[in-house]
Amino acid sequence: MVSFFPKRSKKAGLSPGSLVYIGEETRKATKITVIDYDDKILEEKTIKKIEECFIFRTKPTITWINIDGIQDTSIFTKLGDCYGFHPLILEDILNTDQRPKLEDFSSYLFIVIKMLSYDSKEKKVKNEQLSLILGSNFVISFQEGKKGDIFTPLRERLKNNQSRVRKMGADYLAYSLLDAVVDNYFLILEEVGEDIELLEDELLRNPSDKILQVIHNLKREMIFLRKSVWPLREVISSLHRGETHLIKNSTNIYLKDVYDHTIQIIDTIEAYRDILASMLDIYLSSVNNRLNSIMKVLTVITTIFMPATLLAGLYGMNFAYLPFTEWAGGFFIVLILSALIAIIMLIYFKRKKWL
């Protein structure tokens, strides 16, 4: 069984703010992309060194720096020195088992959420931590780089100088990233819902140990989904309440929409958990009913043959004289008597609707 929590043993004893990557090791190289724009111009490029994006620090335009792959800790040291990020923030980015949260550092916001995907073959939800730092004119996103991101539609919208995201500030860009992640949750829940429906039909047709294992796996994934999504409600709510100057009033209405979507997702997860719990009850009931049916058939067979067994036992006793033992037709009399008793019992069971 794969653990929900990455091991933190390599951080034991280190001082707070130590930059150590905690997560799944991959061979993927770090990829850094920069999109710098306003309502008139847009510049998009891939850079090899983190120092190349520092020139955007003082520009009046909006800058989106996306770092895909966070195993190279030297990048974080340089980035923290340039932007003045707190070492504990950089440490949290590298610790990929963080729960969704929001931290306000006055000049910037730090947001952690989970970017999820669903493997329909393995019936498993896979996660990747997405960290966002929102400043007055920049957004920096950090991805683990496991499967690629879901922000391609947003990049396409940025290329259109008539799109809303080109005319709004960095807070709207951060909202757009959050909205893309939350919308992807709906796609995952649709796939999970289809699997649950198919599993429920199969359960009613043929309950088996294999189906029981799939139900348990899906229940486990629902627990993981709830753990990943539930804290997001408070994150979006805090952003929506406008407790920071970095979120403008014009963006609040869009954050309210994301909050509503988050509540809907949580309700759907809870519904799926209830359905899976009821499916376990259906499985147990089906197994008990099948066992009861088998036991009923065996009981009827045993009951029908009990008179014949009794007669066979009586005629198997070593007495000097038994009725019909010296008559040539005695065997057939006992045989006919046993069959007659069995037929009478079958008729009786039918009338009682025990069969």
Image (cartoon, rainbow, N blue to C red):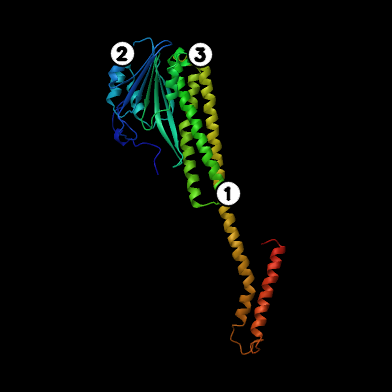
Q: Provide the residue designation for mark 3.
A: 250
Q: Give the quadrant of residue 339.
A: bottom right
Image quarter of residue 173: top left
Query: SS class of the residue under badge 2?
Result: helix
Secondary element at image label 1: helix
Q: Which residue is at the front of the view, 98 or 159?
A: 159
Q: Position of residue 25 (x, y in %)?
A: 32, 35
Disc with the residue nearer the chain's start (2 vs 3)? 2
Q: Sequence-wise, which precedes: disc 1 or disc 3?
A: 1
Residue type marked 1: Leu
Q: Residue at x 56, y 54 (%)?
A: 287
Farthest residue in the right direction?
351
- Label 1 vs label 3, nearer the camera: 1
- Helix or strand or loop: what does disc 3 sit on? helix
Distance, label 2 to label 1, CA atoms, is 63 Å
Q: Position of residue 237 (x, y in %)?
A: 50, 22
Residue 225 - label:
none
Residue 133 versus residue 275 in the image, above or below = above
Q: Nearer the viewer, mark 2 or mark 3?
A: 2
Q: Residues within 10 Å of mark 1 (few under 14, many from 20)?
A: few
Q: Is residue 310 left or right of residue 150?
A: right
Residue type at tag 3: Ser
Residue 104, placed above or below residue 126:
above
Q: Name the mark on residue 55.
A: 2
Question: Label 1: which residue?
Answer: 204
Q: Are marks 2 and 1 in contact (CB under 8 Å)?
A: no
Residue 135 image point, x, y percent: 39, 16
User: For the residue marked with disc 2, what is the amino acid?
Assistant: Ile
